[in-house]
Structure formats: structure tokens, C-alpha cells
């Protein structure tokens, strides 16, 4: 166990492991400190759009993710109560257009793929950060197991409840959105294929709610994730156990395919969605935040993990090309903050379409090019983190600051 290191990455989840791979790719030594006793994350599925896949390829894990990712053909959107077709988002055509596929992953498989590229002797498990102290040319990290480590620079990838963020800025007082999420995982053999036809990835949208179901792990499982407006208080977090009957009651009068799918759920989890303010407080001096620690966002654009992967590649490049890591952190924030703020705003706007009150309203939004869940995200998917890592981002006016 090192008592000192040049760069400490705090957090061994998706963002932290991607960051460690990026640093390795660019010849930069780092140590990773993860709170859990084993690598892995709760939750069932992760979506990665083309620009994030480019970032993952560029940090050396392209083959590993291709081996475990499910190639998504696209999203087929229906009205939740009538089953009426509303929109098709063809991800195979998108893959041709953007030069990279759209994958869905079982989260554990993606964690394993990211870990496979690292020397696990540099990943220190069972290290829950309890505090830090900035002093001159070092940052002292204190862990719950009694270990203390001094690092020249720290990259905080410790998630939405970031200890590093709190140490730097105090509590950010997240606000409950009045929306909650249900999640479930089904054995694909138990799900009639016609439920998810024709794309294997179906979204149902209705008044005040939406419901997604799609294959992961090479069609071995069907991931279910929902979102609904509610007047009930629901705690933040991934692991609160839910009641399948309560979940079903949340979606009254579902069309037959959806009703059958919900009847198969025997276990589920739930959590509330909390909104954190868009902020430039991503780090200072020798400390840089990435991923959810910097920019937690609502799930409505499927970009939470994707933006963390962009962070990892872009920050790695800045560190590679800058003599002073603190200067690299400043430049990283300069190019990343406007883009990520735009993505956060997109996530907010997508919720309006998903929870529109009738099919006519949804169709009008699609026709206007303003309502589709991903149809207005061309600027997100078309970004090339490898070619444009150091450029000022292009963000449409409606999503810019």
C-alpha cells in the first residue's frame, strides 16, 4: 500500500475505472482507491451512445466492451395505454452515421471490462474516504480503514454522494424532483419476444410516466427501468426494495404487451430522482471532480455514464499534454463544463416529452423535432472526443447557458 502517490483516483466505479484506463493509456501512473470490498456497482444496466464508445475505445478497452455489450438496434416508442406507434430511433443507422455503435450493458459486465485493462495492484479496495486536507503541494487523504495517503493530485470519481465534493464545497442540497424510478431485471427466456418487437428495445410513454425495457448481456436478460411523476416522497439511492404490485399499480390501463411484461416482475427496486444545481464547482487547485461527483444528471438522455467516459478521455489527454496537472484541470473544466451543462439541460427537456399527457401532444413534439427522447441529441452523439478533446464545445442555443 503506497503512503504517497502522484495521482490518486478516488472511486472505483465506472468513472474511476475509466479514468484509470485513460491515465494508463497516456503513460501516467495513478492509484485507485475504492470504498467497496470488491469491484462492482449495484444497478442493472448502462447505456453508451456512440461518442462514449469512441472514448472507451480510445482508452484501450474497445475489445473488452464489444465482447460484453449488447448492440442496440434502436428504440421503438409506443403510447403506454394504446400501444400506438409513436417513433423509431434506429441506432444501427446512427452507428453508421457516427462511426461507433450504441451498446447496452449489464453494469457488472462493464465494470469487469474496465477492470480488465488495469494492473489490479494499483486498485485498492476497502478504502472509504472519510476526509481530505489540502496543504501546499500535497493532498492528504484519510480512509475509514485507518490508512492515510498523500497525493500530489486527486481525481474525485466518488459518485453522487462525493466525499471530496462535500469537503470542497459543503452540501449541495439536492432537490427532490417529484419523480421516482422503478427498476427490475428479467430472464429473457421468460419474456415473449413479441413484447419487445421489432427492435428489442421498447419505450412506452404516457401521462406522467414512461417505461423502458430492453435486452442486455447478449439477450440473456431484459432490463426494465421506469420513471413517473409522484406526490410521494421516495428516498434517493439504488437499493431500496420495491413492491412489484405497487409498481404495476403505478401504470394504470397499460396496453397488453406492457401488461404482460409487468406481470412477470417478481422483484424490483425503487428510488427518487433528486436534482442538483448546474454548477462550475468541479474542483480547484490539485483536485478535479469527474462523473457524477461533478455533474450528476437526470437519466432522461441516457448520458450519465457517457459523460463520465468523455471526462476520462478528455482529462487524460489534457494531463498528457500539460506540464502542470493543475493547469490541465483548468483546461479540462473550460472545455467540459459548457458541454456537460448542455447535456444536463437536454436531460431535463426530455422528461417533458416522456411524460406528455396524450399521444397527440407527443406526436406534435416529434413532428416539430423537439420532443423525441434522442432525436434532438445529434449534437451529443456526433461529438468526437478523440478529435475534439481540446476544442470549445458546440452546444445548441436551447441547451447552452
Image: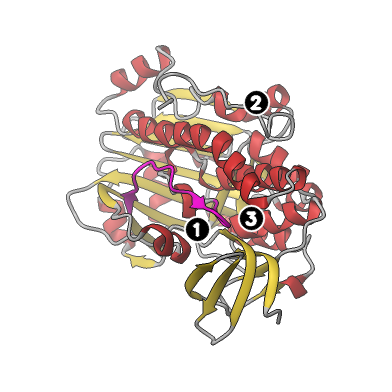
Separation (CA) of disc 3 from disc 1: 10 Å
What's the residue at 42%, 65% (across, down)?
Answer: 167
**For residue 282: magenta?**
yes
The answer to whether 21 is drawn above or below residue 101 in the figure is: below
Are the residues tagged 2 and 1 within 8 Å (C-beta)? Answer: no
The residue that label 3 is drawn on is: 220
Query: Magenta part of the protein: which range?
Result: 273-290
Give left or right: position of 206 versus 185: left
For residue 258, which quarter of the picture? top left
Q: Position of residue 177 (x, y in %)?
A: 26, 46
The residue that label 1 is drawn on is: 185
Mark 1 closeness class: few <14, some 14–19, many ≥20 residues within 10 Å: many
The answer to whether 225 is drawn above or below residue 148 in the figure is: above
The residue that label 2 is drawn on is: 94
Are the residues tagged 3 and 1 within 8 Å (C-beta)? Answer: no
Q: Position of residue 398 (x, y in %)?
A: 40, 21
Amino acid at each position: 500500500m503506497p503512503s504517497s502517490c502522484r495521482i490518486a483516483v478516488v472511486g472505483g466505479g465506472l468513472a474511476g475505472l475509466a479514468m484509470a484506463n485513460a491515465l494508463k493509456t497516456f503513460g501516467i501512473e495513478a492509484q485507485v482507491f475504492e470504498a467497496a470490498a470488491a469491484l462492482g456497482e449495484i444497478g442493472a444496466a448502462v447505456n453508451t451512445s456512440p461518442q462514449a464508445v469512441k472514448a472507451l475505445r480510445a482508452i484501450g478497452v474497445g475489445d473488452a466492451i464489444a465482447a460484453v455489450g449488447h448492440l442496440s438496434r434502436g428504440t421503438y416508442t409506443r403510447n403506454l395505454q394504446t400501444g400506438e406507434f409513436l417513433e423509431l430511433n434506429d441506432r444501427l443507422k446512427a452507428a453508421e452515421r457516427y462511426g461507433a455503435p450504441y451498446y447496452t450493458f449489464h453494469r457488472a459486465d462493464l465494470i469487469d471490462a474496465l477492470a480488465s485493462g488495469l494492473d489490479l495492484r494499483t486498485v485498492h479496495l476497502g478504502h472509504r474516504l472519510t476526509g481530505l486536507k489540502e496543504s501546499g503541494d500535497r493532498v492528504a487523504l484519510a480512509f475509514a480503514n485507518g490508512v492515510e495517503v498523500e497525493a500530489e493530485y486527486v481525481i474525485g470519481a466518488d459518485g453522487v454522494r462525493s466525499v471530496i465534493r462535500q469537503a470542497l464545497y459543503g452540501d449541495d442540497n439536492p432537490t427532490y424532483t417529484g419523480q421516482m424510478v422503478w427498476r427490475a431485471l428479467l430472464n429473457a427466456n421468460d419474456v415473449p419476444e413479441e413484447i419487445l418487437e421489432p427492435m428489442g428495445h421498447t419505450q412506452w410513454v404516457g401521462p406522467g410516466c414512461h417505461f423502458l425495457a430492453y435486452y442486455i448481456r447478449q439477450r440473456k436478460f431484459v432490463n426494465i427501468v421506469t420513471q413517473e411523476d409522484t406526490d410521494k416522497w421516495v428516498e434517493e439511492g439504488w437499493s431500496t426494495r420495491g413492491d412489484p404490485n405497487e409498481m404495476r399499480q403505478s401504470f394504470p390501463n397499460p396496453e397488453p404487451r406492457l401488461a404482460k411484461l409487468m406481470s412477470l416482475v417478481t422483484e424490483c427496486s425503487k428510488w427518487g430522482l433528486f436534482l442538483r444545481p448546474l454548477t462550475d464547482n468541479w474542483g480547484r487547485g490539485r483536485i478535479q471532480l469527474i462523473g457524477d461527483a461533478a455533474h450528476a444528471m437526470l437519466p432522461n438522455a441516457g448520458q450519465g455514464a457517457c459523460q463520465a467516459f468523455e471526462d476520462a478521455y478528455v482529462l487524460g489527454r489534457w494531463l498528457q499534454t500539460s506540464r502542470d496537472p493543475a493547469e490541465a484541470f483548468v483546461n479540462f473544466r473550460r472545455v467540459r463544463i459548457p458541454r456537460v451543462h448542455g447535456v444536463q439541460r437536454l436531460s431535463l427537456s426530455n422528461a417533458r416529452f416522456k411524460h406528455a399527457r396524450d399521444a397527440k401532444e407527443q406526436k406534435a413534439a416529434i413532428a416539430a423535432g423537439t420532443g423525441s427522447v434522442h432525436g434532438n441529441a445529434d449534437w451529443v452523439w456526433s461529438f468526437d472526443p478523440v478529435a475534439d478533446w481540446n476544442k470549445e464545445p458546440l452546444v445548441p442555443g436551447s441547451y447552452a447557458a
